Image: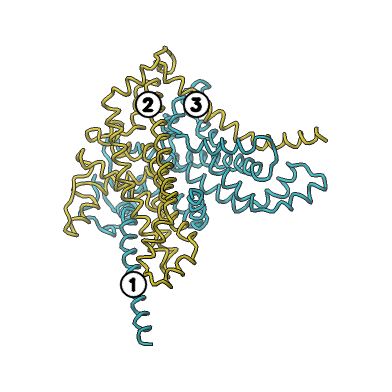
Amino acid sequence: MKKNGSNKSKKLTIEIIKVVVLFCFGLIMMGPFIWMVSVSFERMANIQPPFPPRLFPKEFSFFNYEIILENGSLLKAYFNSFVVALGSVALNIFSALLAGYAFSKGVFKGKKLLFVVILATMMIPGEITLIPMYMMFNKVGLLNTFYPIIFPSLLFGFGIILTKQYFDKLPNSLREAAQIDGASEVRIFTKIFLPLTGPISATLIILSFMRSWNSFIWPMIVLSDQKLQTVPIYLASFSMEDGTRYAGLTMGLATASILPVIIVFLFLQKYIIQSVALSGLKGE
Amino acid sequence: MKKKNKNTQLVWYLFLLPSFLGLALFMAYPVMESFRLSFFRSNGTIEKWAGIDNYIYVFKNAGFWQAVRNTFYIGFFQLLISIPLGFIIASIINQMKWFKNFFKVIFFIPYVTSIVAAAMVFLYVLHPDMGLLNTLLSSLGLPTSTWLADSTTARWGVIILSVWHQLGFIIIISLANLQAIPNDIYESSSIDGANRFKQWWFITIPNMTGTFAFFVVMGWIGALKRFSETYILGGLQGSPGRSLYTIVGFIYERGFGGNEFGVASAAAYILFAIILIFTIFNLKISKMNKAN
């Protein structure tokens, strides 16, 4: 009896040690974020962050954000990023839902081969396509527009795999009744299956939005016009007219730039974490 | 009857049309065009057949080898640190009673934020005098570093940033796969008197080899394509002293900085070949491990 009791308290101690150790680690992980937000609220115009680093701003103010908003470029970049994200997300889920459905429920020649082709596209580094795509869009006069960034979203390999897995779990009996009634495949898809795609569509929208919002190299290549800059490009190119960077402004911009993704993530973290975990399970 | 069958088949191709249109225009065509371009001297308008000159040029270029060395160096240490560290943290979270979800979210947040914003913040985190990291190190009595101010330590700055950014991914996937290990193996071993640590060492780790192989393969693919963070921290030249110049940095600089599209395409194909060889090599090794 006594042994049982000491065992229990030993277990509790181990549990507390775990929490403390992970909490310290977690603090290190969050450290850069906390510092970023803190510096962004410092009332300061000097180039470097305050030293020594502090958790809370000495003189709390919205000064940096006022300058950022007054300048207006960030709002423009926000608008651009949202336009690009909206187009990319729409194309992503449109093509991924259709293809995923066909690969799951369809019966047609070459299904396996075509699916392998989709899988193979995910192995090819996108960097290899940068130059030809740049030349291609240059030839048709679409550089410095959002089309080169949005159009390639037609191909969303990971999305196709996710939707295929999702449709695989939906019973075939749903189709059979409608087939007996003579409904066409398109009708079966739009009337029966599409309304059931809520959860997977939500996942696709989130993943696709985050990908679009964070993408950097391709938009930077395509959009040389400053008015068209998306948020990461604006952030990367940001400096004062004489080339200096102010820590407070940079941190404010960085905070503002990740805000949409953080908000989406905090609200929908369960789905995001699940879908990422799923991407690793298939590695088994 | 047969004709009707053909018609119903056609519908399915219609479902695939958008995706394969995207594949043809934005994957298949550019991949082939890039291959063709790699044999030409091209600035985008004027093209001249060059044979394998571009490849020879790239192979003889000291800057390219510097880029290869940097890319491999950063990738190697990033994976060496992030995979074991992430796995250990995941193992701890997996056995916790409370705060499980809280820690999952905390560790995962860096992964969802943009690497560009993270790198902008790390410009200051890694600042030699006023940076967060050196302040933390010196307050713990540990030696500080010049980080990005010096070419020998700049790569380690990027390694720290990328481990920080990638750790959540390792943790989340480790957690999912830890939960996929059947419980009865643990139960029977604890009847045999194995303690927690022995179980972890002799059961959990061998059962995770597939997951580790996945991390190594995916990790190398990602590491070989590194660009954004080194570009933010080191600019087009990969400063200081080209220590942050990566393979994609070379492609970007030659292609879009210098309009040498042929050279850049050849470098892109060399990168593709490196990734392919690495992936096959890693898969082979992990299969061998599994067979054992």
Q: Secondary structure at mark 1?
A: helix
Q: Which residue lies at the image location 31% right of the left edge and 24% below the top edge?
A: B59
Residue B282 on image: x %, y %: 40, 41
Label 3: few (<14), some or many (≥20) within 10 Å? many
Q: Secondary structure at mark 2?
A: helix
Label 2: few (<14), some or many (≥20) within 10 Å? many
Structural distance between the alpha carbons of marks 1 and 3? 56 Å
Residue A14's tag is 1
Q: Chain of mark 1?
A: A
Using residue A58 as the reference point, say whether residue A131 is left or right of it: right
Instruction: Inspect the image, locate mark 2, and give the three-letter code of the amino acid beneath it.
Output: Ala
> What is the quadrant of residue A223 in the picture?
top left
Instruction: Inspect the image, locate mark 1, and give the three-letter code of the amino acid beneath it.
Output: Ile
Label 2 belongs to which residue?
A: B267
Direction front: furthest residue: B292
Label 1: few (<14), some or many (≥20) within 10 Å? few
Chain with cyan colouring:
A
Image quarter (top left, top right, bottom left or bottom right) of the N terminus of chain B: top right
Structural distance between the alpha carbons of marks 3 and 2? 15 Å
Chain with yellow colouring:
B
Residue B236's tag is none
Label 3 belongs to which residue?
A: B30
Residue B60 at least partly seen: yes
